[in-house]
């Protein structure tokens, strides 16, 4: 695709209410993932790898850590005199913060109207995958679509997501919004949509006059027969994290070399904020098996089937299994953590045994001491 022919818009707080443990102090986009990344790194990197050099990030609340992480956008080559990275807090004196995606887009419509790009891709920040957005744009052009919506095929996940019926040409012929009903399998939407920017402007004008707020229900579902809506199937590893269980399972998936290679494709790198830190150190009697270990860790105990973020310390005689240990946390001497998610700078005191289950991991909040 031609560079700068597409505008990217990312919602940084999608599904925050579904993960209150991890999002009470941060927005969804800044949730740590995979030892050194944040959720939004994947959405931003996919856009940049497709040659998109103008990206707006729509925020709502608790976005200080997100701003600190993104900064000027330099790690993603978005620190530019022209275009680059834009923070878009959708607030005005009349409406306040937004209640739905359409309302949010209406509140940042000046940003959209002043942009010059032909196409726009709108996506959530909690989509973990390595997706070639240039292929989505090419597919959209080839089909002459009004809207192209990405989808996955398999067992339906939880949540209020659209389920699709798609004909042989790839056109979506039926959309259902099942709410919390998720039994069975089939094609279900991922919150990645592509359309012409002028088409989006028309949608927003209609939504404003009709008081629409929900893109799926008020646009896709209502106008599936009126608009040419096509589905683009994502074939490689991709997951939408919208619950603590999904966060844990998706993190553990990274311990599979095949899934890890699919996600971290050298041809389309995943970029993140760079921290200059010393290499991790390992004690003489330490043991590490099938785990991801970030920089700056000090391991003197045992780590198995786990993900350790930067600066984690595992003391002598401590054991960490099937767990996710975030930045700066400490597992003291003689303690054990099994199926545990430890948020940043938390501590397990000496000779404590904390054990959850893979189906129900225990969460230890940020800076807590247990």
Image (spheres, rainbow, N blue to C red):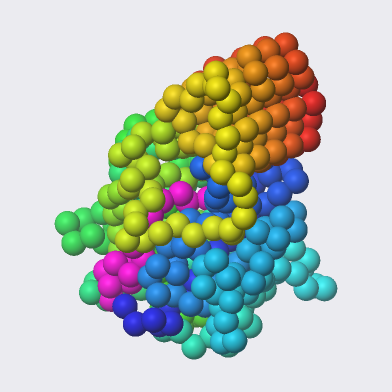
Task: Specify whether residue 138 is painted magenta.
Answer: yes
Residue at image location 21% in from the left, 56% down from the top: 167
Image vertical order of residue 6 relative to residue 364, above or below: below
Kindly indicate the quadrant of the structure image that contains residue 259: top left
Give the x, y percent position of residue 31.
Answer: 62, 47
Q: What's drawn in magenta, residue-wise?
A: 126-141
Q: Is residue 333 left or right of residue 213?
A: right
Single out the residue that lies furthest toward the front.
284
User: Which residue is at a point 78% across and 35% down the rendered structure image?
Assistant: 367
| Front residue (pair 290, 193) | 290
Q: Extreme left residue here?
A: 168
Q: Position of residue 210 (x, y in %)?
A: 59, 71
Q: Quadrant of the C terminus?
A: top right
Residue 239, magenta (yes or no): no
In percent of width and height, residue 279 lies at 56, 43
- Does residue 48 appear to the left or right of 92 in the view shown? left
Query: Residue 63, located in which quarter of the rendered image?
Result: bottom right
Q: Is residue 138 left or right of residue 338?
A: left
Q: Quadrant of the N terminus?
A: bottom left
User: Visible in this render: residue 46?
Assistant: yes
Q: Residue furthest right?
A: 93
Q: Is residue 365 visible?
A: no
- Where 147 sits versus 289, above or below? below
Determine the residue positioned at 38% across, 51% down: 264
Position of 327 with respect to 242 (left or right) is right
The residue positioned 36% from the left and 66% from the top of the image is: 133
* 284 vs 293: above or below: above
Q: Position of residue 294 (x, y in %)?
A: 55, 41
């Amino acid at each position: 695709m031609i560079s700068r022919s597409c505008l990217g818009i990312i919602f940084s707080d999608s599904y925050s209410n579904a993960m209150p443990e991890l999002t009470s102090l941060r927005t969804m986009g800044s949730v740590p993932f995979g030892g050194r990344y944040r959720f939004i790194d994947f959405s931003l990197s996919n856009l940049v790898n497709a040659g998109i050099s103008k990206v707006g990030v729509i925020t709502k609340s608790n976005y200080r850590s997100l701003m600190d992480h993104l900064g000027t956008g330099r790690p993603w080559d978005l620190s530019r005199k022209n275009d680059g990275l834009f923070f878009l807090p959708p607030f005005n004196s009349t409406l306040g913060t937004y209640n739905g995606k359409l309302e949010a887009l209406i509140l940042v419509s000046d940003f959209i109207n002043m942009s010059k790009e032909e196409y726009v891709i709108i996506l959530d920040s909690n989509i973990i995958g390595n997706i070639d957005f240039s292929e989505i744009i090419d597919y959209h052009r080839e089909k002459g679509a009004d809207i192209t919506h990405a989808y996955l095929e398999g067992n339906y996940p939880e949540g209020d997501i659209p389920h699709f019926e798609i004909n042989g040409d790839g056109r979506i012929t039926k959309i259902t919004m099942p709410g919390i009903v998720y039994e069975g399998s089939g094609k279900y939407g991922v919150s990645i949509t592509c359309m012409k920017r002028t088409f989006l402007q028309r949608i927003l004008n209609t939504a404003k006059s009709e008081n629409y707020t929900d893109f799926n229900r008020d646009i896709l579902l209502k106008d599936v027969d009126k608009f040419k809506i096509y589905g683009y199937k994502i074939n490689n590893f991709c997951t939408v994290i919208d619950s603590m269980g999904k966060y844990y399972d998706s993190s553990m998936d990274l311990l599979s070399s095949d899934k890890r290679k699919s996600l971290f494709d050298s041809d389309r790198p995943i970029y993140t904020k760079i921290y200059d830190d010393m290499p991790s150190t390992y004690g003489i009697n330490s043991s590490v098996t099938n785990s991801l270990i970030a920089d700056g860790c000090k391991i003197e105990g045992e780590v198995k089937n786990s993900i350790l973020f930067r600066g984690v310390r595992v003391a002598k005689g401590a054991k960490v299994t099937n767990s996710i240990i975030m930045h700066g946390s400490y597992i003291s001497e003689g303690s054990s953590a099994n199926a545990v998610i430890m948020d940043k700078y938390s501590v397990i005191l000496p000779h404590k045994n904390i054990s959850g289950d893979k189906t129900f991991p225990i969460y230890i909040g940020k800076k807590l001491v247990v």
